[in-house]
């Protein structure tokens, strides 16, 4: 045994656990509003507690963790804590750069360790139902900010001709739409087009409908539907999926159904995780451990729970292209989205471009 290597690894394990511990604290800060309060400027623990309307003793202990963890800074002379603006960008505010929301997904997945470990031993998986309703809310929180900032510029406008067609008026469908915020934004931006959102989750569809009503949208509808059973053959000019293929029980059937419901010349935009299907090509991707973990704890297990394919989050470009080819969709191009975690597969039905 190489003792130096062993010692280095022991240190690494320590770092990993410190990161995990701070993840809990980031989540607590997000849930309690402490990050937004801290972003307002330097404060003692009592001042920060008052600002956020919280118990000082808890805030002081939390400050101990996030200050020793290098997230906040402490001024020994004034006894004040500071969240530097450079750190606040990633932890406070309602914008897409706020990463604090991701901590909630990890702490929530932690609740399912027992059930996932059981599936390691006995097979099967942890079904979607075990993750609802919290998962619906977490996905919404996680993606809503991103769609607010990037949907039009980062996804729609990167596909040549798409915005013009949406402006003129087409029929569009989002599959696995979750709480439908992206579709509601599109419906508001392109009033001449009509939009349909399908998802198997009744709680997500209810939230999508109520947001559409709040926004007084007349050109969008949402329905609880298993997308493998979409019946509108040739009924849509545009179909989109936003991170909604890799966790399907039967992803090939879902892609086949999407291919069928596209009109000739229609376009399918599959926004999905940008990775390789081969582990060896992902080793330099700093996010790979996160992606494989989320897959093990959610995306793969929900599919396996249904006796499904269990593609997992990191199913990757090679397998995605193979499966898309089987649907008969042609001219598949892969574009980079403004979110580096995702890429956009642009697929056309038939050679005659309608978009
Ligand atoms: C990772 S979430 C993404 C949600 C949404 N597209 C977003 O961007 O927030 C995947 C979604 O696919 C839905 N889903 C999974 N299998 C489905 C199926 N067979 N038919 C329709 N929706 C499905 C899930 O209920 C979930 O809402």
Image (cartoon, helix red, strand yellow):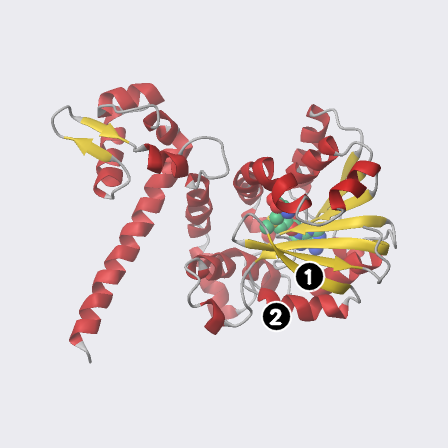
17 is higher (above) or lower (below) than 62: below
Kindly check if marks 2 and 1 are in contact, taking CB atoms under 8 A apart as contact: no
Beta carbon of the mark 2 residue lies under 8 A of ligand 1: no
Q: Residue furthest bottom?
A: 1
Left or right of 118 on screen, residue 32:
left
The foreground one among 49 and 88 is: 88
**Marking on residue 318:** 2
The nearer-to-camera label among 2 and 1 is 1
The foreground one among 334 and 141 is: 334
Residue 246, x across and y down, in percent = 62, 59
Left or right of 312 on screen, residue 202:
right
Secondary element at tag 2: helix
Q: How many marks?
A: 2
155 is higher (above) or lower (below) than 141: below
Crowding at mark 2 (Cα within 10 Å: few <14, some 14-19, many 20+): few
Q: What residue is pinned by disc 1?
A: 333
Left or right of 68 on screen, residue 245:
right
* Residue 167 in sight here: yes
Q: In 3D space, how far apart are the residues under numbered discs 2 and 1 (Cα atoms)?
A: 13 Å
Which image quadrant: the N terminus?
Answer: bottom left
Q: Residue at x 21, y 72 (%)?
A: 5
Residue 222, x across and y down, in percent = 75, 39
The foreground one among 51 and 210 is: 51
Residue 304, x across and y down, in percent = 59, 64
The quarter of the picture where residue 7 lies is bottom left
107 is higher (above) or lower (below) than 149: below
Residue 224, x across and y down, in percent = 74, 44
Beta carbon of the mark 1 residue lies under 8 A of ligand 1: no
**Marking on residue 87:** none
């Amino acid at each position: 045994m190489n003792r130096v290597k062993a010692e280095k690894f022991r240190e690494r394990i320590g770092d990993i656990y410190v990161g995990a511990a701070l993840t809990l604290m980031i989540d607590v800060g997000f849930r309690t509003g402490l990050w937004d309060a801290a972003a307002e400027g330097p404060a003692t623990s009592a001042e920060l507690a008052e600002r956020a309307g919280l118990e000082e003793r808890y805030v002081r202990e939390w400050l101990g963790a996030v200050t020793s963890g290098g997230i906040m800074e402490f001024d020994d002379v004034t006894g004040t804590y500071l969240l530097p603006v450079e750190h606040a960008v990633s932890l406070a505010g309602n914008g897409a750069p706020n990463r604090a929301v991701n901590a909630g997904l990890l702490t929530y997945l932690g609740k399912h360790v027992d059930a996932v470990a059981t599936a390691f031993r006995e097979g099967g998986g942890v079904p979607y139902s075990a993750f609802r309703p919290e998962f619906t809310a977490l996905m919404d929180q996680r993606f809503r900010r991103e769609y607010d900032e990037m949907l039009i510029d980062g996804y729609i406008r990167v596909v040549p001709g798409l915005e013009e067609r949406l402006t003129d008026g087409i029929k569009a469908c989002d599959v696995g739409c979750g709480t439908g915020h992206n579709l509601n934004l599109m419906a508001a931006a392109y009033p001449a087009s009509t939009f349909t959102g399908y998802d198997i989750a009744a709680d997500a569809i209810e939230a999508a409908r109520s947001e559409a009503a709040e926004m007084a949208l007349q050109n969008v509808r949402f329905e609880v539907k298993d997308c493998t059973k979409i019946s509108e053959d040739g009924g849509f000019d545009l179909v989109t999926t936003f991170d909604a293929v890799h966790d399907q029980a039967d992803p090939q059937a879902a892609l086949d159904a999407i291919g069928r419901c596209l009109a000739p010349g229609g376009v399918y935009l599959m926004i999905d995780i940008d990775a390789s299907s081969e582990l060896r090509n992902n080793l330099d991707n700093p996010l790979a451990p996160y992606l494989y973990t989320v897959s093990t704890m959610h995306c793969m297990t929900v599919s396996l729970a249904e006796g499904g394919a269990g593609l997992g989050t990191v199913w990757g470009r090679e397998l995605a292209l193979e499966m898309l080819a089987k649907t008969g969709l042609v001219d598949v191009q892969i574009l980079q989205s403004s979110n580096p975690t995702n890429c956009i597969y642009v697929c056309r039905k038939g050679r005659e471009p309608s978009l």
